Image (cartoon, grey):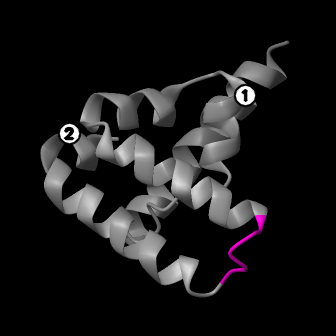
Amino acid sequence: MAHLMLDPQKVLKAALTNIEDWKTKHRTDGMTTQYLEQWERVIDSGVDNVAGVLTGTDDTSKELRQNSPFAGVLSDGERQMVLHSFREHWNQEHDAA
């Protein structure tokens, strides 16, 4: 999310590039293509809507995140830090319960 806010054009361009690439690798009538087309519409509607989907708790946002076109936006090191941080948060919240 931070990358989106810091350099929205770069992040959205990367996502659109991924979408175009992935659409050539999937059946045009498949669910993946439908999700990618939904992402195109979200991206075309602006940064605020993209942020809303990335943080949304509604079913549509959750489904779209399962087919996220934002691969490659984070470096591997950043991705590992996020996963580590989430695991720590999860363990603290759920071990306490």
* Amino acid bearing label 2: Met
Indicate yes or no whether the magenta region holds residue 10: no
Q: Which of the pair 88/35 is nearer the observer?
A: 35
Give x and y (percent) for residue 42: 42, 41
- Which residue is more in the foreground, 89 or 48? 48
Which residue is depicted at the point 67% across and 36% down?
62
Of circles 1 and 2, the one toward us is: 1
To which residue does mark 2 refer? 5
- The residue carrying pointer 2 sits among few (fewer than 14), some (14 to 19) or many (20 or more) residues within 10 Å by Cα, namely few
* Quarter of the figure that contains the C terminus: top right
Question: Which of the 4 image quarters holds residue 63?
Answer: top right
Pointer 1 local density, CA inside 10 Å: few below 14, some 14–19, many at least 20? few
In the displayed structure, would residue 52 be above or below residue 62?
A: above
Who is closer to the viewer here, 43 or 94? 43
Amino acid residing under circle 1: Asp
- Residue range corresponding to the magenta coloring: 26-30
Tell me what residue is drawn at x 82 percent, y 24 percent.
Answer: 95
Q: Which residue is mark 1?
A: 59
- Number of numbered labels in the structure image: 2
